[in-house]
Image (cartoon, rainbow, N blue to C red):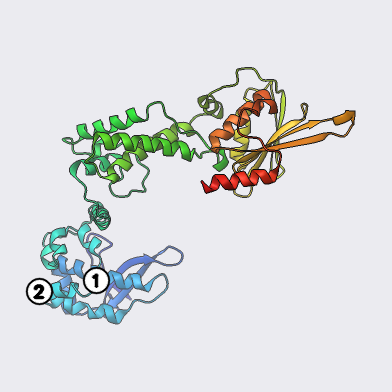
Amino acid sequence: MRDVVFTRRSDWIPNVIREDGELKLVLGAGADAGHAPRTFTFSIGEAHLAVIREDLARHLLLWSAVLPLCDAAGTRGRLDEKAAVALLDPILLAAPTDVDALFQRIRWDRGRLIAHGADVDLLGRGQVCAAMRAATETSDGRRAQEYHAARRRAEHGVVLGPLDAAILMYTGQYLHGATIPRRIPDAVDPALLPEVMRVIATAEQACAGMRIGRDPRRGKRATDKRDWGRMATAVDAAVHRARPELVDDAVRTVSFLMCSEAADRSRSTSMEDDEDAVGDRFGESTRKTILSFTDDKGAEKKWLADGARTASAEFWEFVGDRSASDNEVFTIEDEEMGEGIQLHFYADSIARVTTAHEGGGSDPEYRVEYSLVDGIGGYRNLVSAFVRGGCAALEQYGSWMSDAAELERARRRRDAE
């Protein structure tokens, strides 16, 4: 039989129960292999219960000291009850100086205490009892997150100034640098917001007119890493020039914001719009009427000139739908003209294939030529050129080689640069 003897307003703070006549402390911590919360119990005495009832600070200190033992139990192990019981008297019944000394020797959960109002400076000086004088039953998880964020930066020698912190608050990256940035002006001190907006305006001017195109080789929503890198470099340089006192974390969060917004705009466009944004260098008319798209897995798609969509847009959508780590070779073929191109995404190269009937014979002769390709931008240009002008239109792009071994040597030279 289990009866609850004492509990606080927060369900997470350990409760006291009476089970088969014995007092026990109950706390939830960690998770099992199925990600369900784990619960641990260990025996306490009446004197311990009296302190737990009357002294919130001691109760919280005991909790922070037991949590590392729960962590050590992992997903399946048992709580070291002997070690947990050994903490009771030194934390709940000892003098404050002795408690402070104990916390210099044991592991404890600092963030838990900070979330419940502990004075961070006093904790840092080892005065844990004094730090808990303003402790509260309610928890402020953000306070602990801010402490841990500041500590992580300090470990890397980063000290934020007021404007640095305000910029990180504005982008929502103050606590977690991996968070996708967004604009949150309400999170910034109103006195600092105008300065933050001037930094943002500098970044926007630096990347005006730049875009981040899509990269269907990596999926339907993937964007071009090179475009991202170019935009980030431009914004970083401009912000550093305008505000050299800003730390790198603050500058990076601004460029991350600009690039993320540009990438989102790209993802929201249709393939036709994305193709138009790349630029049409080959005129409006096309001689292609029927094209066949295939991949390395045997999938095929036909494009007809009387359709509503361009051949390039249809092809890149086909790539975005089908491309994968084991499917990186795509072909566009014009059967009527007897020519086609094969894109090798795994090697940043392309092959163009033309057919001819030499000497009037009935069997076709195939001519294959290879060229290296400079990223997704290079592929886009080549595809657009082929769609609009066939293999003849590719002559101006790259250096074409008839020998696959020569291509491999060129690739090695490029990779070594």
Does residue 10 appear in the picture of this structure?
yes
Q: Position of residue 113 (x, y in %)?
A: 21, 62
- The image's mark for residue 369 is none
Residue 168 sits in which quadrant? top left
Q: Residue at x 69, y 22 (%)?
A: 305
Q: Is residue 150 above or below residue 207?
A: below
Q: Is residue 117 left or right of residue 2?
A: left
Mark 2 crowdedness (10 Å alpha carbons): few <14, some 14-19, many ≥20 = few
Mark 1 crowdedness (10 Å alpha carbons): few <14, some 14-19, many ≥20 = many
Marks 1 and 2: in contact by CB < 8 Å?
no
Residue 365 sits in which quadrant? top right
Q: Position of residue 153 (x, y in %)?
A: 26, 53
Q: Residue at x 70, y 37 (%)?
A: 369
Does residue 332 appear in the picture of this structure?
no
Residue placed most toward the observer, 37 or 301 = 301
From the image, tell me which residue sits under label 2.
97
Q: CA distance from mark 2 to mark 1?
A: 16 Å
- Identified by mark 2, the residue type is Thr
Q: Residue at x 47, y 38 (%)?
A: 226
Q: Is residue 130 left or right of residue 160?
A: left
Of the numbered discs 2 and 1, the one sitting upstream in the chain is 1
- The image's mark for residue 65 is 1
Q: Position of residue 121 (x, y in %)?
A: 14, 59
